[in-house]
Image (cartoon, rainbow, N blue to C red):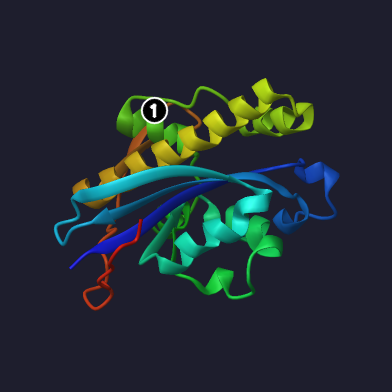
């Protein structure tokens, strides 16, 4: 038995104040980075691959999403899924999405940032920002686009580490507004009837 997982993150072309209403589908997606991997029945990684897709390649990217037993993101239900919806088939939102932030909100009743989780749980932090990612796209130079790709892939790597930690340890830590550290208990196990065997995914 194997699992095929996709961990992803998107960056947009515009800020929310440049779009009509608070609608991520109006922002335009500049890049989407995807870490796709095969896990064995004990959830040990057998094979993994990081890829970044510009708009022209989103149809190739979607083939990975369609095969996935779980599509993992952070704030993906509220942001990444609607942001990508104009580019992908209409059934895209119905795939097997798993939003880490959404799972945390079910327990804590509030939002926490990916950076806060990374600092408290992993002892690391992001080295750039989503605001800069949009600015890199606007600049459009080869150097700026390289920085954009690096930033998006960094977010995917952090999201993957956060997800794996929660699945293996049943908890995450975060730092709140008052700089206090909290633990949140989570269960990221697959439903017992969910796994689907996958072959030749790469």
- How many numbered circles are shown? 1
Q: Quadrant of residue 182?
A: top left
Q: Nearer the viewer, residue 115 or 27?
A: 27
Q: Quadrant of residue 144?
A: top right
Which residue occupies 22% across, 64% down? 2
Which residue occupies 49% across, 64% down? 63
Which residue occupies 61% across, 55% down? 58
Quadrant of the drawing holding the N terminus: bottom left
* Residue 189 pos. (x, y %): 25, 62
Up-down: is 201 above or below 140?
below
Which residue corresponds to mark 1? Answer: 119
Locate residue 54 relative to residue 183 in the image: left or right: right
Residue extending furthest toward the left = 42
| Element assignment for label 1 | helix
* Residue 102 pos. (x, y %): 47, 57
Locate residue 191 relative to residue 30 in the image: left or right: left
* Residue 193 pos. (x, y %): 24, 78
Up-down: is 99 above or below 48?
below
Up-down: is 94 above or below 181?
below
Quadrant of the drawing holding the C terminus: bottom left
* Residue 62 pos. (x, y %): 54, 62
Locate residue 151 relative to residue 172 in the image: left or right: right
Residue 124 in view of the camera: yes
Structural crowding at the residue carrying mark 1, measured as other residues with C-alpha within 10 Å and reported as few (<14), some (14–19) or many (≥20): some
Which residue occupies 18% across, 50% down? 44
Q: Nearer the viewer, residue 44 or 26?
A: 44
Locate residue 187 relative to residue 105 in the image: left or right: left
């Amino acid at each position: 038995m194997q699992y095929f997982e996709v961990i992803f993150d998107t960056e947009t072309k515009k800020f929310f104040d440049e779009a009509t209403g608070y609608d991520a589908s109006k922002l335009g997606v500049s890049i989407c980075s995807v870490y796709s991997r095969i896990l064995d029945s004990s959830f040990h990684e057998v094979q993994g691959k990081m890829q970044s897709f510009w708009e022209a390649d989103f149809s190739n990217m979607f083939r990975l999403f369609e095969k996935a037993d779980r599509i993992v993101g952070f704030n993906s239900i509220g942001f990444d899924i609607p942001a990508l919806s104009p580019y992908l088939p209409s059934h895209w939102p119905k795939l097997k999405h798993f939003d880490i932030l959404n799972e945390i909100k079910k327990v804590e009743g509030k939002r926490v940032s990916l950076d806060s989780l990374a600092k408290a749980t992993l002892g690391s932090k992001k080295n750039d920002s989503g605001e800069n990612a949009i600015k890199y796209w606007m600049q459009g130079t080869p150097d700026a686009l390289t920085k954009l790709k690096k930033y998006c892939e960094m977010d995917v790597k952090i999201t993957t580490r956060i997800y794996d930690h929660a699945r293996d340890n049943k908890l995450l830590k975060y730092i709140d507004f008052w700089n206090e550290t909290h633990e949140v208990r989570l269960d990221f196990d697959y439903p017992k009837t969910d796994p689907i065997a996958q072959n030749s995914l790469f």
